[in-house]
Amino acid sequence: MAAIRGRLAGWWRVAALPVLAIVLALAIAAVVIVASSAFTGIGFFPLLPLYAYGNLFAGAFGSDVAVNNTLVAAAPLMLGGLAIGLGFKAGLFNIGVAGQFLAGAFASAVAGSALASAPLPLAVGGAILAGGLAGAALGAIPGFLKARTGAHEVVTTIMLNNATALLLAWAVTDLVRAPGFTFPRTGDIGNSALPVLLGRNLHLGVPLALVLVFGIRWLLHRTTLGFEIRTVGANPNAARYAGISPLLIVTLTMSLSGMLGGLAGAIQMLGVIGFYASGISASVGFDSIAVALLGRSDPIGILFAALLFGAFRAGAPLMQITTQVPIEIIDIIQALIILFLAAELIVRRVFRLRVRPMEIEGATTVTRSWGAQSVRG
Amino acid sequence: MDVLFVPRLIVELLGYLVAVLPDLLPIILGLATPLALGALCGVLNERTGVVNIGIEGIMLTAAFTGYLTGFALHEAIGPGAALAFGVIVAVATGAVLGLLHAWLCVTVRADQIIAGTILNIGALGLTAYFNRLIITPSGRGGAGVIPTVVVGLGPIAISVLVLVVVLQILLFRSRWGLRTRAVGEHPKAADTVGIDVFRQRYQNVIAGCALAGLAGAYLTLESTGSFQNGMTGGRGFIALAAMIFGRWTPVGSFGGALLFGAFTALAVIVRVRPAGGELGDLLGAIPSFWYAALPYLVTVVILAGVVGRAVPPAADGVPYQKEARA
């Protein structure tokens, strides 16, 4: 009994701040919903947040279909969250997941349509691999530039996000446009579509993402590379004295991170979207930042955070249809959650908490490296 | 293909650029305006030791609130007054978000990159939320655009030229400038001689973010006259690159902003004033998507080439704690 209580207390010490930050964020968002309810067709209505959150919950967990939708929405967020979390471990902030997601989605769509009539394992495997490699290639560029020249990845990855979206729009219009459609898009992916395992849409990407959660956890805590990544994140100078090459580790970490972002795009493409056209949503890229921060860039934390935001994304359409509260309230909730995590002072005061402060390993190095660009790899 | 093809093409290109320069210049200045204002925001923030990657979000929020003000008021008080109110509201929005950023970075000592991320994500959500609730269903337009004053430039674009010069002089020739730089380089020493580090940081972050708000006002009220979700399109980050390119000085940042503006303007000018001959064929054959991607790619290349040689303020990104050692 005492052992169970001790274990519960241990969990609470870890989970208290994130959970209470979510509660506070939902409370503030409720105020926004009430304040803006006058603009909806319903009119000013103080109970609107209850209905909105009720429908959000029903849309995410209310039926087998809803639960499947939540898991399908959570899978790319797990991979995107891992991408950003892994970067944080090495003191890198990869805001480029949105671009890597698009690159992965595009590459897997092109490879998928080329392999459309190949045998199933080859078609699926080849298309997923193409997506991962495209993401890795796109991630390697800012990694190398950061390590070699000090160009901060926060700016370079955002620039590559914009450039990638534009160049892929060109590619799908002029290079790989499939004949027979009224708008520029890639061809059908045929056998490359991820097999559906359960219900109507729970595809192979969901277990794949789960495997990678534990794979990255193993990489970080049980391998030499993981140790080196964490050392570079904690203190790049100490790492150099210990004989670790920050140039190599930073480039490698950004490639791995980009690969995870690319895989997120690949499973979304092969499991949900089916073809690449310009203007497909890369919101996974920005949701992933919130996922990684809420999960403290720890793979298991990211797993739970991705399930939460997957539930938000899956439930939001029902909420918007039935209560006219715009789905963008989810983005506001995300920003508020990160706000309360960053300013944990507020959470501690409001709830009179006495738990250990919440730090994201490596995040300090991200900020320091902005002001220390003369330190070279 | 003869040997002289490439050199001849370069000469033709230079000739073409000189020929279109009179047309190009106002376009460049217009495109550089939000970038320059964003970069000035960056200079003010980072010279006092606060990293601000939330400029993008501040611009977007201010662009929206400014537009919303014009949208709500122009039928009641006329477009001119509504636009003026819009600009004031946009600048005030920037200042309020600056207060939030300063509070997070200076008082709470939160991670500054994460504080900026909060501004960026929150801005996307808030603006899209109220856009869907208020502006889209109304089907009405805004208050139009602020009329131009000289050579196709409006008052905000012109004020940038003044602001750059004034801030350059203030930063390097005034008491405020000396204090600002002291706080950004060595806050402990500044504190020892009686400069209030916290106050200096709050002031500069709020003032800087008000300028980012003005950049937002430029986008919706002086340039386009409409609001689209995510319309800042990375300008806040290009502004940071311009700031680094300009080595954290106002005049240098303006130079960086002009450079990025020039690359963006190229996309416009090759279609409006096409070149003749081989050069025209070549420039015309480049897909428009490539021209659109060019400023972003140039930013990456220039950033990689220039940093390492540019030295940021020593205390950039480091929260100040009175009792902390060194």
Image (cartoon, coloured by chain):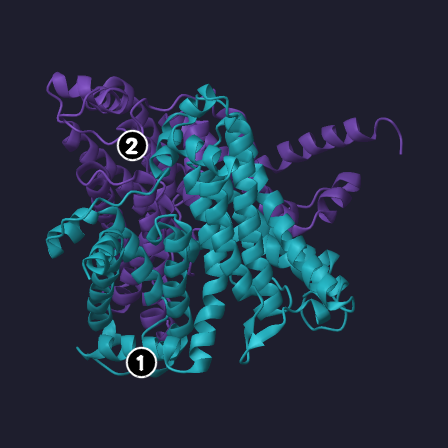
Q: What shade has chain B been given?
A: purple
The residue that appears at 75% across and 43% down in the rendered structure is B282
The residue to which callout 2 is attached is B44
The amino acid type, in three-letter code, at marker 2 is: Leu
Query: Neighbour class for label 1 at 10 Å: few (<14), some, many (≥20)?
Result: many
Q: Which mark is residue A97?
A: none
The residue that appears at 46% across and 74% down in the rendered structure is A69
Residue A304, given in percent of the width and then of the height, sits at 37, 60
The residue to which callout 1 is attached is A323
Quadrant position of the N terminus of chain A in the picture: bottom left
Which chain is tinted cyan? A
Report whether A24 appears left or right of A376: left
- Which chain is disc 1 placed on? A
Q: Can I make out residue A328 in this image?
A: yes
Residue B187, given in percent of the width and then of the height, sits at 21, 22
The residue that appears at 37% across and 68% down in the rendered structure is A312
